[in-house]
Image (tube, rainbow, N blue to C red):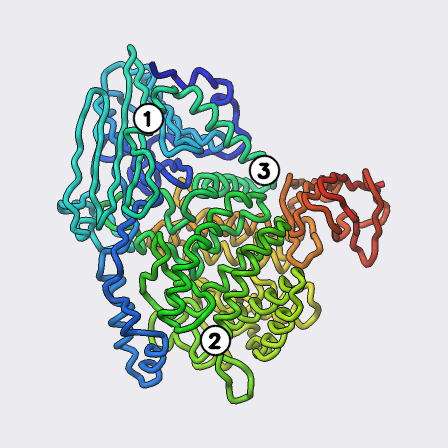
């Protein structure tokens, strides 16, 4: 018999949440405004379609993985692209690489299907809420009926329970329109209907209190949805699962087996373990800021991160486990964009103290390292490693605008995440087995791609800057762009640093020598960082690729002195002067990070409010265009992607604490009005966990835990050298507190 999950943890479910949750007076009428539930493997969107309550179901590995018909590395290599560009025949390249991405329906992420409940007889909805602390959605009707539903934090299934049902309700499974005409009128970035995939429509079978849907996809791929339920008096409880299978994948229980096993064990244990996971998640870190808009958005972003990231699940793609439920392929095929999207999605993992969830990204990159190396040999005819800028679930290239989808420095930006994981964890095994090998492989590849310029320095034969000039021939620069150059210089700088750390001095010297052979970044005395030599930043553009050296790489930094400060100041001023006409939502999130690094808290808060209020739907989903139509951007469309959401969270963290220079700075970029602000257990480079509190504009306490031991360097936040430390000795020099800490040691620093 199924145990009812609400009663067993009623106190947990009904307690007042300390986080900002979602509460509405009615169900959303579109999928992208739905209540989002997920665990990085499966997800659900709770909304209403044509009068029926709908759970739009998804699974991260539901992919049509057919090869791109146009990508033939026996015929086309990077050298051929260069020759066509050089000869003025770039249209031939576009026809082969760019056009098919839009015309061919696959490879692509695909949706799973939906469960629908006929709620017509239940009357008017009173309230719909999502408690982010327990990741539980509750729907209440005016007649007293109540639905509670959640996606389990650790298992590939969801649960639902109706209470006080006055009538029986019908339950149906709805399959995507794989082999029938799409009647949807919703416009989206994608123009391809699902029926273009060519699947035979899957079969839905009904049992006693159960429904099963089996769908065959391309090749050996298939998936299954199953839900079972039980009825007792005026209550209905059940669960659902989505499973996937492919010839080359590890065998796993199908959805019928998963649901059957969990129905036997009951929902009481399931809900308890679910809540426990989320309680542990929220205990990792916390912030409290006196701006209700930014605090709410931050809480919702970190909830979504907890719902989309796991160490044992695929990384966060464009929509993660919330693929569009509108009869078409998802925006940009729901793929993995590595020219910005995956990178920004993991920014909040480091300072937010969620390294174990960020590992899913790195594990995936490492798993498909052989695939990436083969791509590097086949297309670039080079050793080392590069990664396609747009990939499938299994790391294969998908084409598109090849300046970025097959760019030369993609693996370098991905290497930044390997480096950050090392610096924030100080895990020497990871350094030796993952971080340095990846960055070394990138260095080897870039060494192969370099040619000598007229001044004797190294350069790339042709270079790009995402996504400047879109996919035109002009998007290839004859000189190395600041985007590529920043990543190249960073790669050799960090390859040397990590080699020295590992005692590989000959290799370190080699990387130092190569670094010295690359030119400095292109800087204009008035406008700051440029696209490339002789190409100033002179237009509004969504992707701040030209200033990678400043953020996130930190090659140029305020801490480096007057020259860098001037470059940063001029760059940010010019960015503002060129305007935001052609920005999307993530541009504002990224700008918040830029201002935070420049210690401009008022401006950071301002642009982050614009993001939260005008570039997100009511459920907090980032939808790229200006939904306020307030002139913040000429883009007013609404394709949902996640990277803007997570870059927002990272910007809030940057306002509260920074450690990228090796010296920790507390509250570096908070507005003057934030007199009372605090955070708990934010992580810094060096593997320190720090909690700090500011009251009435004055820092009153700082708590530090060292995971690995080492020298803590902290800019003195007390504006006085009269401080005391709870344990151990310290020194203060040039305004920096230095404490030698042991592994596991905890200290508190206060005013004396």
Residue 276, compared with residue 41, is above or below; it is above
Q: Quickly name the residue at label 2.
A: 448
Q: Earlier in the sequence, mark 3 or mark 1?
A: 1
Nearest the camera: 340 or 721? 340
Q: CA distance from mark 2 to mark 3?
A: 43 Å
Badge 1 is on which residue?
A: 239
Percent position of residue 1, x then y:
33, 14
What residue is at 58 percent from the left and 58 percent from the top? Answer: 595
Q: Name the N-terminal-most of marks 2 and 3.
A: 3
Q: Is residue 428 left or right of residue 357?
A: right
Whether residue 751 is visible, yes or no, is yes
Under circle 2, the secondary element is helix
Q: Which residue is mark 3?
A: 284
Question: Is 645 on the left-hand or right-hand side of 103?
Answer: right
Q: Residues within 10 Å of mark 2 (few under 14, many from 20)?
A: some
Which secondary structure, mark 1?
A: strand
Please state which of residues 635 and 413 is positioned toward the viewer in this rendering.
413
Observer-nearest residue: 100 or 586? Answer: 100
- Secondary structure category for the residue under label 3: loop
Q: CA distance from mark 3 to mark 1?
A: 29 Å
């Amino acid at each position: 018999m199924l145990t009812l999950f609400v009663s067993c943890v009623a106190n947990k479910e009904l307690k007042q949440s300390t986080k900002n949750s979602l509460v509405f007076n009615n169900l959303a009428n579109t999928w992208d405004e739905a209540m989002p539930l997920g665990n990085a493997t499966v997800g659900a969107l709770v909304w209403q379609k044509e009068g029926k309550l709908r759970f739009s179901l998804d699974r991260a590995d539901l992919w049509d993985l057919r090869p791109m018909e146009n990508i033939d590395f026996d015929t086309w290599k990077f050298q051929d692209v260069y020759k066509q560009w050089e000869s003025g025949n770039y249209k031939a390249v576009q026809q082969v690489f760019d056009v098919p991405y839009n015309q061919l329906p696959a490879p692509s992420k695909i949706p799973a299907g939906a469960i629908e409940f006929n709620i017509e007889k239940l009357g008017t909805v009173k309230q719909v809420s999502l408690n982010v602390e327990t990741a539980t959605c509750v729907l209440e009707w005016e007649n007293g009926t109540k639905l509670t539903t959640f996606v389990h934090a650790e298992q590939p299934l969801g649960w639902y329970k109706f209470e006080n049902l006055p009538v029986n309700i019908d339950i149906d499974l709805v399959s995507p329109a794989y082999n029938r005409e799409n009647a949807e009128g919703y416009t989206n970035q994608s123009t391809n209907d699902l029926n273009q995939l060519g699947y035979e429509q899957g079969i839905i079978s009904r049992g006693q209190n159960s429904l099963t849907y089996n769908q065959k996809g391309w090749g050996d791929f298939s998936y299954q949805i199953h839900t079972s339920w039980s009825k007792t008096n005026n209550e209905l409880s059940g669960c659902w699962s989505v499973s996937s299978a492919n010839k080359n994948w590890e065998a796993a229980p199908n959805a019928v087996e998963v649901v059957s096993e969990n129905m036997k064990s009951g929902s009481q244990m399931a809900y308890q373990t679910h809540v426990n996971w989320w309680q542990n998640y929220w205990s990792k870190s916390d912030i409290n800021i006196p701006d209700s808009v930014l605090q709410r958005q931050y809480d919702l972003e970190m909830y979504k991160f907890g719902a989309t990231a796991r160490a044992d699940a695929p990384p966060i793609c464009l929509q993660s486990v919330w693929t569009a439920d509108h009869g078409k392929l998802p925006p940009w095929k729901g793929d993995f964009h590595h020219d910005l999207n995956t990178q920004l999605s993991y920014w909040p993992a480091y300072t937010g103290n969620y390294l174990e969830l960020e590992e899913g990204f790195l594990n995936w990159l490492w798993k498909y390292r052989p695939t990436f190396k083969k791509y590097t040999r086949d297309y670039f005819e080079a050793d080392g490693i590069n990664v396609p800028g747009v990939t499938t679930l299994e790391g294969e290239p998908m084409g598109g605008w090849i300046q970025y989808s097959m760019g030369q420095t993609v693996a370098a930006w991905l290497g930044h995440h390997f480096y950050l994981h090392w610096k924030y964890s100080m895990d020497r095994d990871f350094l030796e087995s993952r971080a340095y090998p990846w960055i070394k492989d990138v260095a080897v590849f870039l060494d192969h791609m370099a040619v000598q310029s007229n001044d004797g320095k190294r350069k790339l034969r042709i270079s790009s800057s995402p996504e400047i000039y879109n996919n035109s021939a002009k998007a290839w620069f004859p000189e190395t762009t600041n985007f590529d150059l920043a990543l190249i210089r960073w790669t050799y700088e960090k390859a040397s640093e990590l080699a020295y750390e590992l005692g590989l001095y000959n290799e370190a010297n080699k990387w130092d020598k190569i670094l010295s052979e690359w030119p400095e970044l292109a800087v204009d005395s008035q406008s700051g960082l440029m696209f490339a030599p002789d190409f100033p930043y002179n237009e509004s553009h969504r992707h701040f690729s030209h200033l990678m050296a400043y953020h996130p790489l930190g090659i140029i930094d305020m801490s480096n002195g007057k020259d860098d400060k001037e470059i940063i100041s001029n760059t940010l001023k010019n960015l503002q002067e060129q305007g935001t006409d052609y920005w999307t939502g993530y541009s504002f999130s990224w700008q918040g990070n830029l201002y935070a690094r420049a210690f401009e808290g008022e401006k950071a808060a301002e642009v982050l409010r614009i993001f939260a209020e005008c570039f997100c739907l009511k459920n907090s989903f980032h939808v790229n265009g200006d939904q306020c139509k307030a002139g913040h951007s000429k883009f007013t469309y609404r394709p949902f992607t996640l990277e803007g959401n997570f870059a927002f969270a990272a910007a809030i963290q940057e306002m509260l604490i920074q450690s990228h220079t090796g010296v920790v700075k507390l509250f570096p970029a908070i507005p003057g009005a934030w007199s009372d602000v605090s955070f708990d257990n934010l992580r810094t480079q060096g593997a320190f966990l720090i909690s700090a509190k500011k009251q009435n504009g004055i820092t009153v306490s700082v708590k530090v835990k060292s995971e690995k031991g080492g020298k803590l360097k902290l800019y003195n936040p007390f504006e006085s050298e009269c401080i005391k430390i709870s344990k151990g000795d310290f020194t203060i020099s040039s305004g920096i507190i230095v404490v030698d800490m042991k592994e596991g040691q905890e200290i508190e620093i206060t005013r004396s």
